Image (spheres, grey):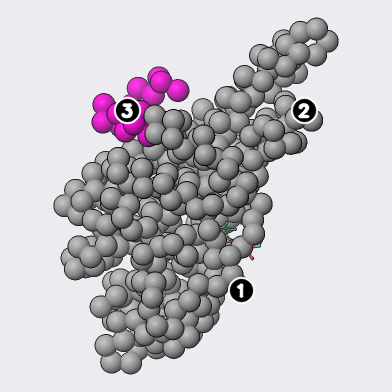
Amino acid sequence: MNNLFYLSEDQRAIRSLARDIARERIAPLAARVDETGEYPDEQLKLLGQQGLMGLHIPEEYGGTGAGSLAFCLAAEEVAWACAATSTIFLVQNLGGYPIILAGNAEQKRRYLPRLATGEMTAAFSLSEPGSGSDAAAMLCSAVRKGDRYVVNGSKMWVTNGSHAGVITVFVTTDKAKRARGVTALLVEPGTKGFSVGKHEKKLGIHGSPTVALHFADCEIPVDNRLGEEGEGFRIAMQTLERSRPTIGAQAVGIAQAALDASIGYARERRAFEQPIGAFQGIQFMLADMATAVHASRLVVHHAAGLIDQGATSTALEASMAKCLASDSAMKVTTDAVQIFGGYGYTREFPVERFMRDAKITQIYEGTNQIQRVVIAQHLLGKL
Ligand SMILES: Cc1cc2nc3c(=O)[nH]c(=O)nc-3n(C[C@H](O)[C@H](O)[C@H](O)COP(=O)(O)OP(=O)(O)OC[C@H]3O[C@@H](n4cnc5c(N)ncnc54)[C@H](O)[C@@H]3O)c2cc1C
């Protein structure tokens, strides 16, 4: 879409840069990343070298400070090319944002410049084996002993946890207080007592590692705490509020790729002596797919734009954007497989990958049921 009249010149330039890199350098490797599960190291380095890893990071800490909408534009382009690479690209924002939000000057100086260039990647560790949607029920605990926290327990589903140079880990320092007892700690690999566990075998986004983390009497300096003890849950929720539109952008990118592939196939594939695109049944599917992608993009940009304007609360719009865009992406990619017929079900064409990749956008950073809970709470208030 080139008629997005509200984009600034800078935002258009960022989208154009991301599109060129994504289409020329990332897309050609996507099928291989999916097939082998290899970590897209070179692709991420390239995004870092071109300044795209630092779009959300303030200029004083080495980023471009371009903001949330700019980041969403870049994320969509990367996701169009390779959803796995885009997941790690998004986690650079998700894992680093708590530092922007709650880090002190020393913590910001230590990590943000390296995250901005992509020299270091980040991860965000909230979920556990027994708690995902109900994140405040976490069990991984930290007990303060002098100038250290002793951490014990396990986290799960940590995207990029095996490769990150810094992981924002949420632990409980007072289980009885539930959400008010959660504390955020910055953990670096190599810390004694910290280890990376099982790598999940997943339906899609192969190449984006999803791992368990284990802590056994792991000592983390109090200096690595973000904000105050007990502020971790607020930091996590504020981060997710800002990050959910980026998942929407990822969903839009995957859906746009499926739509583009479907339009091409509808022109070329022939049945009953005409292109299948000549059948109204196919035309209506394409029309609905394009409309869903367009509408999703607009709600994502609206939520991101609100964040850039400094809106005090964007939880409603962020949940709507994530929910609509990911549900649309699932529908659009499923329809794309249908348009490709039997070939759509094979690895000869990318649409089955798009469908597998789209599914995760309905699950992570809060399932779409949880997004609907957030939306309904805004509508109804406390009953
Ligand atoms: C590939 C992948 C990558 C991930 N990356 C990360 C990461 O980097 N960091 C991280 O912290 N986590 C990560 N996650 C975890 C993810 O955020 C959780 O899986 C998700 O929040 C759901 O939690 P759960 O799996 O425990 O499901 P559960 O919470 O057990 O939910 C099970 C089902 O019940 C539904 N449900 C639960 N509560 C309600 C309710 N109140 N109303 C209606 N329905 C409800 C859910 O929607 C779901 O359908 C990742 C997960 C995956 C699969």
> Is residue 374 inside the magenta stretch?
no
Q: Is residue 230 visible?
A: no
Q: Which residue is mark 3?
A: 12
Q: Nearer the viewer, mark 2 or mark 1?
A: 2
Residue 216 locus on image (x, y percent):
48, 85
N-terminal of the two: label 2 or label 3? 3
Left or right for 302, reference 100: right
Identify the amino acid type marked 1.
Gly
Tell me the distance, in whole angstroms, between the alpha carbons under discs 2 and 1: 40 Å
Q: Which residue is mark 1?
A: 130
Residue 81 locus on image (x, y percent):
50, 36
Residue range (magenta): 1-18
Closest to the observer: 195 or 354? Answer: 195
Question: Residue placed farthest to the right in the image?
Answer: 272
In the drawing, what numbered circle is on residue 103?
none
Residue 307 locus on image (x, y percent):
33, 45
Q: Secondary structure at mark 3?
A: helix
Residue 265 in which image quadrant: top right
Query: Is the C-beta separation of discs 2 and 1 under 8 Å?
Result: no
Seen in the picture, residue 106 relative to 203 is either above or below; the reply is below
> Is residue 16 inside the magenta stretch?
yes
Q: Secondary structure at mark 1?
A: loop
Tell me the distance, in whole angstroms, between the alpha carbons under discs 3 and 1: 43 Å
Identify the amino acid type marked 3.
Arg
Left or right for 172, reference 110: right
Seen in the picture, residue 133 relative to 141 is either above or below; the reply is above
N-terminal of the two: label 3 or label 1? 3
What residue is shown at x 16% (from left), y 52% (from top)?
60
Q: Which residue is mark 2?
A: 341
Identify the amino acid type marked 2.
Gly
Q: Nearer the viewer, mark 2 or mark 3?
A: 2
